[in-house]
Image: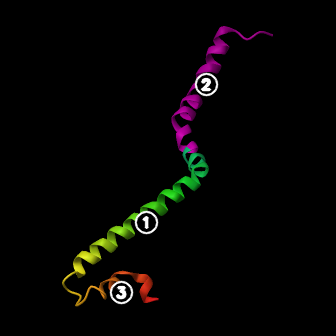
Amino acid sequence: MMITGIETAALALAVLPSVISALEHHNDGLTPVKNFFRYKGLIKELVDDLKLQTLLLRNTCEQLLTGVVESDTELPRWVDAKSRK
């Protein structure tokens, strides 16, 4: 038994919406997979961003405390959180 042209067209039209939907949403499924493989790179980027923000905060604190703290030797104690431990 052979498939006629009409049956082939009907099959193609029945499958076409599913194919279009899959093509439209394939990026939604790939993003978590891409992120999984870029995990180490993303973590390193976040750590670098946090280090930068820490330096910016330290610099801002130094600028704000200059002139308020009585001596330059006490300034690092007020700015550097490690010295408080």
* Residue 57, quarter of the rendered image: bottom left
Q: Secondary structure at mark 3?
A: helix
Question: Magenta stretch containing residue 80, yes or no?
Answer: no
**Residues packed near mark 1 inside 10 Å, few (<14), some (14 to 19) or many (20 plus):** few
Label disc, if present, on residue 77 of the rendered structure = 3
Q: CA distance from mark 1 to mark 2?
A: 52 Å
**Residues packed near mark 2 inside 10 Å, few (<14), some (14 to 19) or many (20 plus):** few
- Say which label, 1 or 2, has the lower sequence index: 2
Residue position for label 2: 14
What's under tag 1, amino acid-wise?
Leu
Please report the bounds of the magenta region as a residue range. 1-30
Magenta part, dominant SS: helix
Q: Secondary structure at mark 2?
A: helix
- Say which label, 3 or 1, has the lower sequence index: 1
**Residues packed near mark 3 inside 10 Å, few (<14), some (14 to 19) or many (20 plus):** few
Closest to the observer, 73 or 8: 73
The answer to whether residue 31 is left or right of residue 49 is right
- Kindly identify the residue that appears in the image at 44 percent across and 83 percent down: 82
Q: Are marks 3 and 1 in contact (CB under 8 Å)?
A: no
Residue sitting farthest toward the right: 1
Q: Secondary structure at mark 1?
A: helix
Question: Magenta stretch containing residue 11, yes or no?
Answer: yes
Residue 55 higher or lower than 20, as above or below: below
The answer to whether residue 60 is left or right of residue 7 is left
Residue 66 higher or lower than 45, as above or below: below
State which mark lies toward you, 3 or 2. 3
Residue position for label 1: 50
Query: Quadrant location of the N terminus?
Result: top right
